[in-house]
Amino acid sequence: MIKTINGWRAVFALMIVLFHVGATSFEEMTWAGVTFFLMASGMLLAMKYPFNQPDAPSWRSFAGKHAAKLFPLHWLTLVAWIVIMAVLGLLTINPTALALNATLLHSWSLSHSIYFSFNKFSWFLSTLLFCYLCYPLLARWFMPLRLRHKAIIIALLAVIDIAILAGTDDYSRTALYVFPPVRLIDFIIGMTLAEACGFLKDKTPIGKGQNGTDGELVAIALLSVMIMTFRSYPGVLPWSDAILWWIPVAAILIVSRTYDKREGFIGKILASKPLQWLGDISFEIFMLQGIAALLYNYLLDPVMSHIGVHYVYHEVSNDLLGANAPGLIVWLILPIDILLAWAVNRLFTRPVARLLRRA
């Protein structure tokens, strides 16, 4: 694992949670964060699994191994969500939505009530599973192409993506935001970055510099420019969910890979033990944020309301944003989420992973 990438995982996961529980100033980092997770997955897989011969046994082994990283935690959070909502008397079950959700096929639906059903954040796992299943074929037929040919293919996919999103309403745009074939482009870009990093690492001065402080500052500057663009020009909205963040996220990943083990000042912070610890449980932090908000809403909120701190959870819309929620709320829900993530990682994710490795 590249430590700075793991550190960025922690940063983006925390900001995604903060946005979802009411800190709207982190909206742009949420879109960038989802793009980062998909691109980083493609890049790291391309570095680790060349997959020159995608025969059936190899594909099954790869698919089984990577599906095993997603389904156990998904099923745990799905069951937990159903139990909590049933206890609260808020549970309604659509059998079709449940079947698609349980099998991680729900992000293929264009219906909001299905792709955001139950633990709404599981749509990401559905999309990521599709990317994993496509990877062996992409590694065999896409990765051997020359870098410039890959760039041309990505440019064509980007044009198609831009054309599809242009003029879409919020409902359609959200459906495309979670739709696996659309988000596969992020994953493919990440795979291409693995080769681009190897090319750049051999170049001077990038390959010879002592540390990556300058590169880290450039990457953060690009991210800041995109955030300011998003806030200043409402016309970029159709492409703000993913396309707008390709360049700054690519810069972050390239700098992290190129200056691995010779990080600059920012990289050293990202590689610090606290952020590495949070990065290791970022998967759980992301998946448990809705449950953490529910626990706060129904366990702590009655107590906090007595001192004037009140949070509203919209069960019907499955929206974590609290109406008029004070800023203090986000800092109360976040530690609950982190504590849950740590406990689930230690008591469930790791033991299950060990069992599956023995199987």
Image: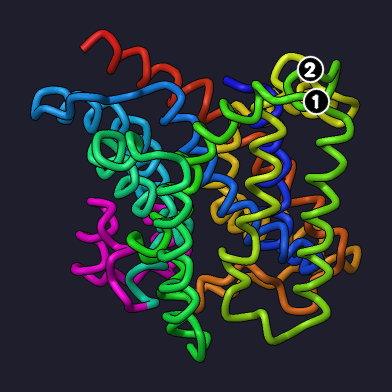
Task: State if disc 1 and disc 2 touch (CB < 8 Å).
Answer: yes
Q: Amino acid at mark 1?
A: Pro
Residue 123: x, y in percent?
A: 40, 58
Does 339 sit left or right of 155 as displayed? right
The CA span between labels 2 and 1 is: 5 Å
Q: Say if 95 sits above or below 168 in the image.
A: above
Q: Residues within 10 Å of mark 2 (few under 14, many from 20)?
A: few
Label 2: which residue? 208
Does 2 sit left or right of 85 as displayed? right
> Is residue 117 among the parts visible in the rendering?
no
Label 1: which residue? 205
Residue 70: x, y in percent?
A: 36, 38
Q: Say if 271 sits above or below 101 in the image.
A: above
Q: Which stretch appears magenta?
A: 82-111
For the C terminus, the quadrant is top left
Q: Is residue 117 magenta?
A: no
Does 90 sit left or right of 231 as displayed? left
Q: Say if 160 sits above or below 13 in the image.
A: below
Q: Amino acid at mark 2?
A: Lys
